[in-house]
Image: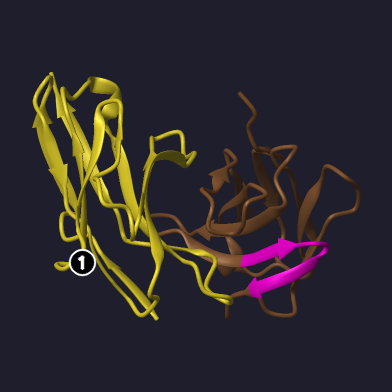
């Protein structure tokens, strides 16, 4: 069974500042992936960043980085130098690597608003 | 850059009618998925498809749903007799050939409204 918790329904950040979006998870799979997706108001789901459970280093993709703390089961997304276009819903998701568990399981999301 | 495409972008239908949602996954991907998102809620898994058969399905994916890969490029979701509660955004996704643990790339979605 998998569970994803995103405790921040909404977050505000000043343009050019950094922001951290929280995600904690619970999974019984010994190996798994953690993903963040962005959903702007237009509705599409845009892949941002991936972290494998056995990766030693935190993942980074441009202005996005993932603060992965395996023992605490957290996978927070850090967005640096926020831009107005970052305003969107952000979803954390897990993916199990076991047979029968290869689907993404999403959290409830955090709505980020970037203030000019 | 290759992307997943979906048609139509919007579909309005009457309760009890059949709808077919279409997807063209990324061309060299082998794993295909359908997810749905009821307005204001989280994204939920419906079904995954590999090697011309369903590999996993959720409790949501009951007998009124079916999936098909009618040719080498399209992947479809059919809802036989739509209900009001089927109104949602339906996303198709695909992932590559290394295994189902690869990143899933989503299409832009089809917004279905059942009246």
**Chain A drawn colour:** yellow
Is A110 in the magenta? no
Is B50 in the magenta? yes
At a point 83% along the width and 42% down the height, the residue shown is: B73
At a point 68% along the width and 46% down the height, the residue shown is: B11
Instruction: Locate residue A62: give its quadrant.
Output: top left
State the SS at label 1: loop
Question: Front-most of A54 and B80?
Answer: A54
At a point 25% along the width and 27% down the height, the residue shown is: A63
Mark 1, Cα crowd under 10 Å, few <14 / some 14-19 / many 20+, is some
Q: Mark 1 points at which residue?
A: A73
Q: Where is residue B108 in the image (x, y as percent from the top left)?
A: 57, 38
Q: Which chain is represented by brown in the image?
A: B
Which residues, given as a range, are shown in magenta? Answer: B47-56
Question: Front-most of B47 and B103?
Answer: B103
The chain under label 1 reads A
Against B92, residue B50 (above or below) is below
Quadrant the N terminus of chain A occupies? bottom left
Q: Is residue B41 among the parts visible in the rendering?
A: no
Instruction: Locate residue A32: give its quadrant.
Output: bottom left
At a point 59% along the width and 44% down the height, the residue shown is: B109
Horizontally, residue A112 falls left or right of residue A47, namely left
């Amino acid at each position: 069974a998998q569970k994803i918790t995103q405790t921040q329904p909404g977050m505000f950040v000043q343009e050019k500042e950094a922001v951290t979006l929280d995600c904690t998870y619970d999974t019984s799979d010994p190996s798994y992936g953690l993903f963040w997706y962005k959903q702007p108001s237009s509705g599409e789901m845009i892949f941002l960043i991936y972290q494998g459970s056995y990766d030693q280093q935190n993942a980074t993709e441009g202005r996005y980085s993932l603060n992965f703390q395996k023992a605490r089961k957290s996978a927070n997304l850090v967005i640096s130098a926020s831009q107005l276009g970052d305003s969107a819903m952000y979803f954390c998701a897990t993916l199990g690597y076991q047979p029968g568990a290869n689907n993404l399981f999403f959290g409830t999301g955090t709505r980020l608003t970037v203030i000019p | 850059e290759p992307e997943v495409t979906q048609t139509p972008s919007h579909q309005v239908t009457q309760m009890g009618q059949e709808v077919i949602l279409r997807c063209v996954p990324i061309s060299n991907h082998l794993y295909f998925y359908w997810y749905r998102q009821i307005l204001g809620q989280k994204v939920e898994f419906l079904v995954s498809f590999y090697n011309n058969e369903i590999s996993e399905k959720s409790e949501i994916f009951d007998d009124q749903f079916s999936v098909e890969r009618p040719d080498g490029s399209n992947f479809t979701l059919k809802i036989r007799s739509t209900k009001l509660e089927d109104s949602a955004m339906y996303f198709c996704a695909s992932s590559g050939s290394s295994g189902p643990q690869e990143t899933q790339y989503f299409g832009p979605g089809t917004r279905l409204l059942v009246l």
